[in-house]
Image (tube, rainbow, N blue to C red):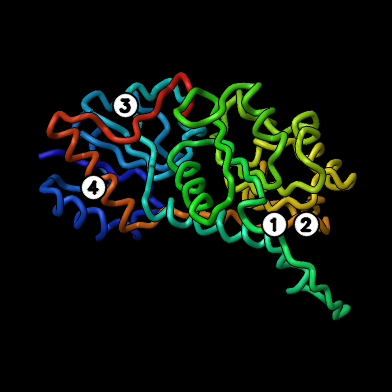
Amino acid sequence: MPTILFAAPSLWPEYQTALPQALAEVGVTGPVVTEARPEDVDYIVYAPSSPLQDFTAYTRTKAVLSLWAGVERIVGNTTLTQPLCRMVDPGLTEGMVEWVVGHTLRHHLGMDRHIVNPGHVWDPTCPPLARERPVAVLGMGALGAACAAALQALNFPVTGWSRTERPGCLHGEDGLRQALATAQIVVLLLPKTPETENLLNAAQLALLPQGAVILNPGRGPLIDDAALLAALDAGQIGHATLDVFRVEPLPTDHPFWAHARVTVTPHIAADTRTSSAARVIAENIRRGEAGEPFLHLVDRARGY
């Protein structure tokens, strides 16, 4: 019977009932506790904001199971030698798909000029069809692939790009240039790593068709903020809808707030849903007890 340490104190009220229920559903009966001797712990349910930062004493622990999708705040911890699994939550994926599809359609259809129309301008201009609006999705992991599939179902021609080679995707620097060259809407769904920071810089933004739209629900540092503001001011980028930022909450004096071509959403594109996330954690614990491979295991070398 495994001992499961829930080491994310701020989230415990949400999971106190949901996690034991999910464990019971997969036949795991081990106790879920908020305190335990390190040498007794078999699994750690974790969030990078946890006060637990030194994993050295947890010699019996089979896996650290993160409740967050992003692992950049923990993957470099040298005391963490146990297998680390990130959260891939079906509820989070659904939320991300809805945000991406919603804002893609908003910009594709030009909804803003009708919703905010103080001059009561009668403009009967029709948008093109979705099949005439190329979209690039940068980052084709679980979230990117799901968003790309949803957009393709609406007839948007979608080009997927990945840092590493994936079937059906462009990859590498040449692939990125090719993906950006025709994209009227770009969706960023990459993890934050040294290789992805400032991925969209001045040179890359210049490759896009004039007036292209940027959607970033991935990670704030994927975009060079200064380069983006310059491209918006020059009209090279038509609009940027941003859900993530280098500093959160976004400081009230940040230029994004006041820019007419920027929409700020407060990191709400997707959230982990307690009930579905608890099932993901429970399934990984079941797998660990059965000697099966863990789901969503982090590749330390890649950083995600």
Sequence-wise first label, 3 or 4: 4
Q: Distance between the residues labelled 3 and 4?
A: 20 Å
Instruction: Quickly name the residue at label 4.
Output: 33
Sequence-wise first label, 2 or 1: 2
Instruction: Quickly name the residue at label 2.
Output: 257
Residue 43 relative to residue 260: left or right? left
Please tell me which residue is depicted at 81% across the width and 75% down the height of the picture: 117
Circle nearer the viewer, 1 or 4: 1
What crowding class fits label 4: few (fewer than 14 Cα within 10 Å), some (14-19), or many (20 or more)? Answer: some
Sequence-wise first label, 1 or 4: 4
Q: Residue 264 carries which label?
A: 1
Q: How far apart are marks 2 and 3 (CA)?
A: 40 Å
Amino acid found under the numbered disc labelled 3: Pro
Circle nearer the viewer, 3 or 4: 3
What crowding class fits label 1: few (fewer than 14 Cα within 10 Å), some (14-19), or many (20 or more)? Answer: some
Instruction: Quickly name the residue at label 3.
Output: 83
What crowding class fits label 2: few (fewer than 14 Cα within 10 Å), some (14-19), or many (20 or more)? Answer: some
Sequence-wise first label, 4 or 2: 4
- Picture coordinates of residue 272 (x, y %)? 42, 53
Amino acid found under the numbered disc labelled 4: Val
Residue 218 relative to residue 149: left or right? right
Sequence-wise first label, 3 or 1: 3
Please tell me which residue is depicted at 29% across the width and 46% down the height of the picture: 280
Tag 2 and tag 1, C-beta contact below 8 Å = yes
